[in-house]
Image: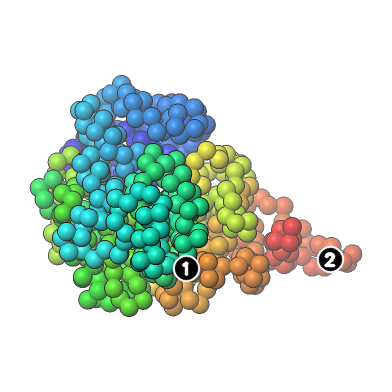
């Protein structure tokens, strides 16, 4: 491999994404610097990095979000570049500008591109000017509730209230009638102000039961732009993605070409550089609309890596170092099917409430076509200060049905004890007939997910696999007999594990 463009990179993030970037740095021969908060001292990314630096107290506003502190640490350690991961400062133009002012390369787009595409109102206007289809919406300059509600009535309900300065589901509300608008506008402004420091909102027509399809792009500083295909991200809860796959089961070859060309045009219009994602909503009639552009590496980037064979973090680093893209569009080949499940420390049986505590037992799944991006280990204490995403389970197979079966198998082997996780939820999705057929939209969870109606045979099967795995270690399950209703019975580890699991489910 050619000499890397940087000798040392600081990773301004934590958890599984910090580990993801650190591994690519290690492969490229680049020295890594990890920053961490006081509560994150025992994390994997701190143990793995070449150099580490405590950046402040646990609250992110006092540590990971301190632009001045991150830049100061980078200068102190003589880091030539900073990779922001995703979340925190990844889409902050002030941070990108601070890096540039300090003579440090920001591994991401320019501050100007971040500003242009980070403002949803401005991005809509810019994309519309070059012919990209935009969801019909009210005049974004409207400020008073009266004017906004009047515009919503003219569009017709339902409408979507959205934050102008950001995405990720923050500041979004669906209004079904005019009477609900005042309280929803107030709530959306408050959430937008908290999340983005900007309370501006706008209103657009709500598209019922859409699919969420996004295209990965790469762009260098010479004006070359390519796409790496699409990802289907329609399994969502409250506008937050939970499962992603590539390719999308909804796209025909012709529609895929149209959307890919629109994504490349969007990137060129924004003078975009580095990795980014152009997101679309797809309605039931096959019409698609520009939604937004995520100006960073996405959580779900591994599915694209598995079907293309590319390392997106490596490409980011090379582009930030001034290298020209080594690929033409015709060089990008797609093979097989990939699915990603976001493993979060949340309780799906209790409205997905966050779960904190020590991980008392951990067994990652293995086998053909299985990839784990994880930031946890047995004994790790999951904090409540940060995003509950703790790992990503990704599988690849030669086709979608095999990929679904492989993910189901991998999830059945996945053991995390000590905290509640979304593993049971993902198992349920993989076994749902609509998901298996690829016939789902962004309302899938709201329409179908009822924890109390999950088929109990799923738990029995999972318990059997769990027992088989646990018997490989010292589990205390080697008794020859067990007591059942006061009677001795030949001991079956499968029955024992299934009963234990059923007992937990009834608690």
Vertical order, 490 against 127 (above or below): below
Q: Is residue 136 visible?
A: yes
Q: Which residue is mark 1?
A: 443
The quarter holding residue 10 reads top left
Residue nearest the observer in this picture, 322 or 94? 94
In the rendered image, is residue 233 in sight? no
Upstream in sequence: badge 2 or badge 1: 1
Q: Residue at x 33, y 41 (%)?
A: 90
- Number of the label disc, if any, that sits on residue 96: none
Figure label count:
2
**375, 267: nearer the viewer:** 267
Q: Is residue 465 left or right of residue 264?
A: right
Where residue 484 is drawn, which disc sits there?
Answer: 2
What element does badge 1 sit on?
loop
Of badges 2 and 1, nearer the viewer stands 1
Separation of residues labelled 2 and 1 (CA atoms): 44 Å
Which residue, as the protein is rendered here, is positioned at the far left?
Answer: 222
- The residue shown at (49%, 32%) is 59
Q: Horizontal and vertical percent for residue 304?
A: 31, 59
Question: Considering depth in this image, is 374 or 296 the residue closer to the camera?
Answer: 296
Quarter containing the N terminus: top left
Give the quarter of the image for residue 335: bottom left
């Amino acid at each position: 491999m050619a000499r890397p463009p940087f000798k040392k990179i600081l990773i301004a993030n934590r958890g599984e994404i910090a580990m993801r970037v650190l591994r690519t740095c290690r492969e490229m021969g680049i020295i890594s610097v990890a920053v961490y908060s006081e509560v994150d001292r025992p994390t994997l990314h701190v143990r793995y990095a070449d150099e580490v630096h405590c950046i402040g107290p646990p609250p992110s506003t006092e540590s990971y979000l301190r632009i001045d502190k991150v830049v100061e640490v980078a200068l102190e350690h003589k880091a030539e570049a900073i990779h922001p991961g995703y979340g925190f400062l990844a889409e902050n133009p002030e941070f990108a500008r601070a890096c540039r002012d300090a003579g440090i390369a920001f591994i991401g787009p320019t501050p100007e591109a971040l500003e242009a595409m980070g403002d949803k109102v401005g991005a809509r206007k810019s994309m519309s000017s070059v012919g990209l289809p935009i969801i019909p919406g009210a005049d974004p300059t409207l400020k008073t509730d009266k004017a906004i509600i009047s515009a919503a009535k003219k569009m017709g309900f339902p409408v979507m209230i959205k934050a102008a300065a950001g995405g990720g589901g923050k500041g979004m509300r669906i209004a079904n009638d005019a009477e609900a608008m005042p309280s929803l506008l107030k709530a959306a402004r408050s959430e937008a102000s908290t999340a983005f420091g900007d309370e501006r909102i706008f209103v657009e027509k709500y598209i019922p039961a859409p699919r969420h399809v996004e295209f990965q792009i790469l762009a260098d500083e010479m004006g070359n732009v390519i796409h790496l295909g699409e990802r289907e991200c329609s399994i969502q809860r409250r506008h937050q993605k939970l499962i992603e796959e590539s390719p999308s089961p909804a796209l025909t070859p012709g529609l895929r070409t149209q959307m890919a060309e629109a994504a490349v045009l969007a990137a060129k219009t924004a003078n975009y550089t580095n990795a980014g994602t152009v997101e679309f909503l797809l309605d039931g009639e096959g019409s698609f609309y520009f939604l937004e552009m995520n100006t960073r590496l996405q959580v779900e980037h591994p599915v694209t890596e598995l079907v293309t064979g590319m390392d997106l973090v490596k490409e980011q680093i090379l582009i930030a170092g001034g290298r020209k893209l080594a690929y033409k569009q015709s060089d990008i080949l797609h093979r097989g099917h990939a699915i990603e499940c976001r493993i979060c420390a949340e309780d799906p049986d209790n409205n997905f409430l966050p779960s904190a505590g020590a991980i008392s037992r951990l067994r990652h799944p293995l086998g053909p076509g299985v990839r784990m991006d994880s930031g946890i280990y047995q004994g790790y204490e999951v904090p409540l200060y940060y995003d509950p995403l703790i790992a990503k389970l990704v599988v690849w197979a030669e086709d979608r049905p095999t990929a679904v079966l492989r993910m189901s198998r991998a999830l059945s082997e996945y053991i995390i004890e000590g905290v509640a996780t979304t593993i049971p939820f993902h198992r349920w999705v993989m076994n749902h007939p609509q998901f298996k057929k690829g016939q789902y939209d962004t309302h899938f969870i709201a329409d179908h997910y009822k924890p109390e109606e999950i088929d109990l045979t799923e738990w029995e099967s999972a318990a059997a696999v769990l027992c088989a795995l646990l018997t490989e270690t010292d589990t205390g399950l080697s008794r020859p007999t067990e007591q059942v209703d006061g009677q001795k019975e030949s001991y079956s580890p499968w029955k024992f594990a299934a009963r234990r699991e059923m007992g937990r489910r009834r608690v």
